[in-house]
Image (cartoon, rainbow, N blue to C red):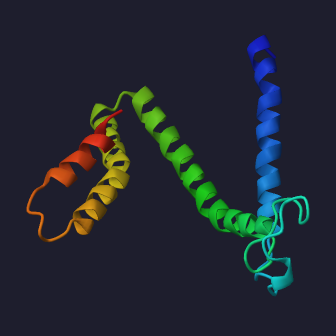
Amino acid sequence: MSRSRARRAPWLVLAGVLLCGLFVASLSAPEFMPTPELDRAFLPPWSAPPAGTDDRGLPLYLYGLQGARIVLGPSLAAGGLIVAFATVAGLVRCAGVAWLDGFIQVFGEIVGALPRLVVILVVALLIPMEWKSLTPIALAWAVLAAP
């Protein structure tokens, strides 16, 4: 193993351990929140470790675990899809198929623009009807288009 790979290996192991920890934590999240305990409302972290409680006395870490449970599946699926797509794009680029490489590049640009387009549409929907100007949309586009 080369020196640069040996230096990266501990960080890769740490990243793998953290990802596995997140996966296990998300699987350990309760399906339903427990019954509220109003007498334990707004407890600080030192009284209700590790993060305290909310206004209903529920531990805040349970909200984090449930959020991780909801986000983990789509995130892993999106990551796997990106890896597969990038592998195919790299193989096409190496093979020298110019028309397919151009198509993949255009597709990637369109997919990359979709989140910005959604923000622009939301801004357009939130503009009051009295404003007949496109200035807010232009400003939002300028902010989102900046690198």
- Image side of residue 4 versus residue 100, left or right: right
- Image side of residue 41 versus residue 81, left or right: right
Q: Is residue 74 above or below residue 99?
A: below
Which of the two residues, 123 or 31, is positioned nearer the viewer here?
Answer: 123
Location of residue 63 by image quarter: bottom right
Which part of the image, by quadrant, shows the C terminus?
A: top left
Location of residue 103 by image quarter: top left
Residue found at the very far left of the displayed protein: 132
Residue found at the very far top of the displayed protein: 3
How many marks on residues? Answer: 0
Using the rendered image of the protein, determine whether residue 61 is visible from the camera's viewpoint.
Answer: yes
Residue found at the very far bottom of the displayed protein: 35
Q: Position of residue 105 (x, y in %)?
A: 33, 38
What residue lies at 76% left-to-right and 83% top-to-bottom?
Answer: 32
Q: Position of residue 117 (x, y in %)?
A: 29, 55
Q: Is residue 115 above or below residue 124?
A: above
What residue lies at 75% left-to-right and 80% top-to-bottom?
Answer: 56
Q: Position of residue 49 (x, y in %)?
A: 89, 61
Which part of the image, by quadrant, shows the N terminus?
A: top right
Q: Position of residue 4 (x, y in %)?
A: 74, 15
Using the rendered image of the protein, determine whether residue 103 is visible from the camera's viewpoint.
Answer: no
What residue lies at 44% left-to-right and 27% top-to-bottom?
Answer: 94
